[in-house]
Structure formats: C-alpha cells, structure tokens
Amino acid sequence: MRDLWAVLEELVEDPEPSEKFEAEYLARDTDAIELSLNTERPKAMQAVLAYAFWVRKHLLSRSKGRQTRSGMVREDAGIPGSA
C-alpha cells in the first residue's frame, strides 16, 4: 500500500496545471469542474479520496460495522498519518 501512496503523492503534487494555465482555462467558456475532470492533479485527489473511502469501508466490514477509536481508519490501513 505504501507504493500506492507514493504514486498518489507524486501525482497530487504535480505542478500542472499551473496557476497561469488554470486562469487561462477558466477564462474560456469552462468551469472548475471541467478543469478537475481534465487535469492530472485533481484526478489524483479524486483517487486519494476514492481509496480512503474504500479502505474505510473494508476496515469497517472487517470489524463487523464497528468503528475504530478515532472513528476513521486504523494504523494498519497503510495511510500515512493514520496512526
């Protein structure tokens, strides 16, 4: 799982789209939702959230619907900062 997080981290920190590109893109007849569907960094954030929800769902199902003490994910989920 750490390999997955390393890839997602790299994609989320991608410098594109730049602020200049975003401004030019949004100045056309488009909106932020379209920008998020057509550029790498927002798509990577969507993948982070999808994976986090998947991990939470599977951890809860393994514990028969009981949440962890924090109410979120357990340390063994492999998510940085989830300890």
Image (cartoon, rainbow, N blue to C red):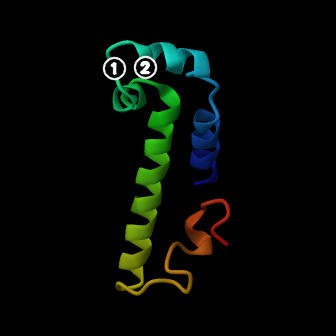
Cα–Cα gap, marks 2 and 1: 5 Å
Query: From the image, which quarter does the C terminus lie in?
Result: bottom right
Residue 18 visible in image:
no
Residue 18, compared with residue 82, is above or below; it is: above
- Front residue of this view, candidates 65 and 43: 43
Residue found 63% across the figure and 68% down from its top: 82
Q: How many marks?
A: 2
Amino acid under disc 1: Thr
Q: Which residue is mark 2?
A: 26
x then y, percent, for residue 19: 60, 22
Residue 24 visible in image:
yes
- Front residue of this view, candidates 75 and 19: 19
Secondary element at image label 2 = helix
66 left or right of 23?
A: left
Figure quadrant of residue 14 = top right
| Rendered image: mark on residue 14 | none
Residue 20, compared with residue 42, is above or below; it is: above
Q: Which residue is mark 1?
A: 30
x then y, percent, for residue 75: 62, 73
